[in-house]
Image: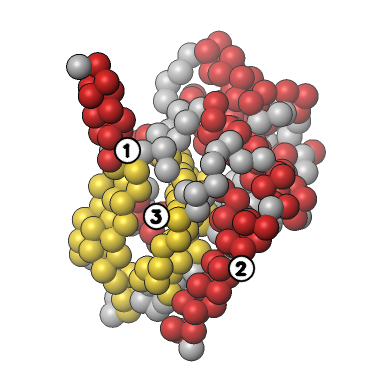
Amino acid sequence: MPVAGSVRSIMVSSHHIAAAFRDVTKRFGETAILEDFSLEVAGGEFVSIIGPSGCGKTTLLRLLAGLTEPSGGEITQEGQAGRSAYIFQDATLLPWRTALRNVELPLQLAGVSRDERRQRAEELLKLVGLSDATLKYPRQLSGGMKMRVSLARGLALQPSLMLLDEPFGALDAMTRNRLNEELLDLRERQPFTALFVTHSVSEAVFLSNRIVVMSGQPGRIAVVETIDFPYPRKSALREQPEYYEKVAKVTGLLHQAEEVVA
Ligand SMILES: Nc1ncnc2c1ncn2[C@@H]1O[C@H](COP(=O)(O)OP(=O)(O)O)[C@@H](O)[C@H]1O
Ligand SMILES: [Mg+2]
């Protein structure tokens, strides 16, 4: 029965879990930073995390990347840990390497041959719209261009999971909006699951399937809001009343979560 078979395979893929936190607790010394944090991220899902400063958002990404260990609970990630990429607010490019050679770096470290890594880095820079800047050094690039190089470098090893920690927080609003659209566009062309930390509610609404609103401290999930605008999402979405309403709703949820601290 081909119909039943295909329905089942769709169901299986929608239940496939790319990353999960189960009852995760994190302490630094005596201080509980995260408590009973549980979240499952489905394959291909885009999940944003917002919450007051210090509620443990960066710690969540670091736990998932294996950069720090949980004090309790369990963290799982599909595939090998090496299949995730970590993008920071600061593009963290090497100043003495050109854009091209910055993107080549993870490929070089993975032992990819010179010709192949050059070709792949060129393709990636083209993907982020920087074909004309491959030989420029970071100091010759704008903030938005540096972040595009950082995204290209992050995509170099074709990660199944992208961990993004306020990647557009230092950019002006117009560049940020443009990069939001570009990030979704990149995901259409090279699919990945995303866990995205931001302080911007409008950015989270624009990008995400779900927004996790945290309260702190210790960090916990206050509420999870589903955003079901269909993808591909284009800039026109920002002018829709449904979009404004969602931004207002999530802003209210965030304010409630922040009052938990006070
Ligand atoms: N290595 C560490 N040692 C001690 N405390 C830490 C360490 N890393 C983070 N913290 C503390 O954990 C809390 C959460 O930090 P973080 O995850 O960076 O929060 P957020 O990203 O939400 O602002 C903060 O109070 C921070 O000071
Ligand atoms: Mg942080």
Q: Which mark is residue 49?
A: none
- Which of the 4 image quarters holds residue 150? top right
User: Earlier along the polypeptide chain: callout 2 or callout 3?
Assistant: 3
Q: Position of residue 239 (x, y in %)?
A: 73, 52
- Residue 36 against residue 195 in the figure, above or below: below
Q: Position of residue 255 (x, y in %)?
A: 54, 77
- Residue 142 against residue 27 in the figure, above or below: above
**Quick one: 16 or 193, which is closer to the camera?**
16
Q: Residues under labels 1 and 3: Cα distance?
A: 26 Å
- Residue 194 against residue 128 in the figure, above or below: below
- Residue drawn at 60 percent across, 25 percent down: 124
Q: In the rendered structure, which amino acid carries the disc numbered 3? A: Arg
**Quick one: 221 or 225, which is closer to the camera?**
225
Residue that numbered label 2 is attached to: 248
Does the rendering let one see residue 70? Answer: no
- Residue drawn at 50 percent across, 53 percent down: 227
Judge left or right: residue 221 versus residue 148: left
User: Earlier along the polypeptide chain: callout 1 or callout 3?
Assistant: 1
Specify whether tag 3 is near ligand 1 (CB below 8 Å). yes
Q: Secondary structure at mark 3?
A: helix
Judge left or right: residue 2 versus residue 116: left
Q: How many C-alpha atoms fall within 10 Å of the one at disc 3: few (<14), some, or many (≥20)? A: some
Residue that numbered label 1 is attached to: 14
Q: Position of residue 22 (x, y in %)?
A: 23, 58
